[in-house]
């Protein structure tokens, strides 16, 4: 079984913000696979099950705020008995240009409060993460917290459908082909776009 968790903040106030691109991707994945996200009894997340490429998958979006994501992820990991290599956390990344998608087997939180919360709750860095580039503010003096909690600009919004498609392809590949083959394809594709 695989668990794919899209990080974000709950509530309509945060819909369409940069920090919620992870949860937006998982919600779109569910929509395309006709899987309805529902809240389970005593659950701190919305979740749905789908079977893809013969593999049972749980898709989830925490209902906690970003910096408390770990509690929701830990509960899902325990409930479904998910191993680290079968957990994929989908999150925004300031250090990648808008539209870049990168897959990692493990690593640090890279300054991301949601990922830090997951690492702390699971007591391990050994889980996969799909990092979705949102870029940094144009002005260095801009407040990072305000930036990640703001909506994409009109010009950026035009790039979001392709961005989400790339992320969804990466998730599908991770489910079907595993981490190594998907990293080779996804991360190389990002480098080719830079050339």
Image (cartoon, grey):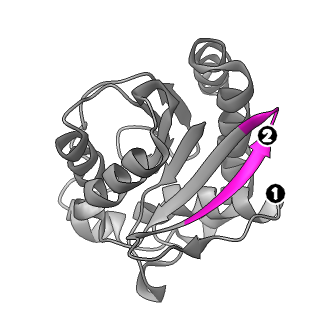
For the residues bearing labels 2 and 1, Cβ distance under 8 angstroms: yes
Give residue 132's mark.
none
Where is 182 relative to 9, above or below?
above
Whether residue 79 is visible: yes
The location of residue 138, given as percent across then percent down, is 35, 55
In terms of image quadrants, where is residue 172? top right
Report crowding for label 2: few under 14, some 14 to 19, many 20 or more residues within 10 A (C-alpha).
Answer: few
Residue 93 falls within the magenta-colored stretch: no
- In the rendered structure, which segment of residues is drawn in magenta? 47-55
In terms of image quadrants, where is residue 13? bottom left
- State the SS at label 1: loop
Q: Quadrant of the C terminus?
A: top right
Give residue 52's mark.
2
Whether residue 159 is visible: no
Q: Which residue is mark 1?
A: 33
Residue reaching furthest bottom?
12
Say whether residue 52 is left or right of residue 105.
Answer: right
What residue sits 60% from the left and 36% below the top? 1
Please identify the dominant SS of the magenta region: strand
What residue sits 79% from the left and 40% below the top? 52
Residue at mark 2 to residue at mark 1: CA–CA distance: 9 Å
What residue sits 43% from the left and 38% below the top? 96
- State the SS at label 2: strand
Given this view, does label 2 or label 1 mark the residue nearer the observer? 2
């Amino acid at each position: 079984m695989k668990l794919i968790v899209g990080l974000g903040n709950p509530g309509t106030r945060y819909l369409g913000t940069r920090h919620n691109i992870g949860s937006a991707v998982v919600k779109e994945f569910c929509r395309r696979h006709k899987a309805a996200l529902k809240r389970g009894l005593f659950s701190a997340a919305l979740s749905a099950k789908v079977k893809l490429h013969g593999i049972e998958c749980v898709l989830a979006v925490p209902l906690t705020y970003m910096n408390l994501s770990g509690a929701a992820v830990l509960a899902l990991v325990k409930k479904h008995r998910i191993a680290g290599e079968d957990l994929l956390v989908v999150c925004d990344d300031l250090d990648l240009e808008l539209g870049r998608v990168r897959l990692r087997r493990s690593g640090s939180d890279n300054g991301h409060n949601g990922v830090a919360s997951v690492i702390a709750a699971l007591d391990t860095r050994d889980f996969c993460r799909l990092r979705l580039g949102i870029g940094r503010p144009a002005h260095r003096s801009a407040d990072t917290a305000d930036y990640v909690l703001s909506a994409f600009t009109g010009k950026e919004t035009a790039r979001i459908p392709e961005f989400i498609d790339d992320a969804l392809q990466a998730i599908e590949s991770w489910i079907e082909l595993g981490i190594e083959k998907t990293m080779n394809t996804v991360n190389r594709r990002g480098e080719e776009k830079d050339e």
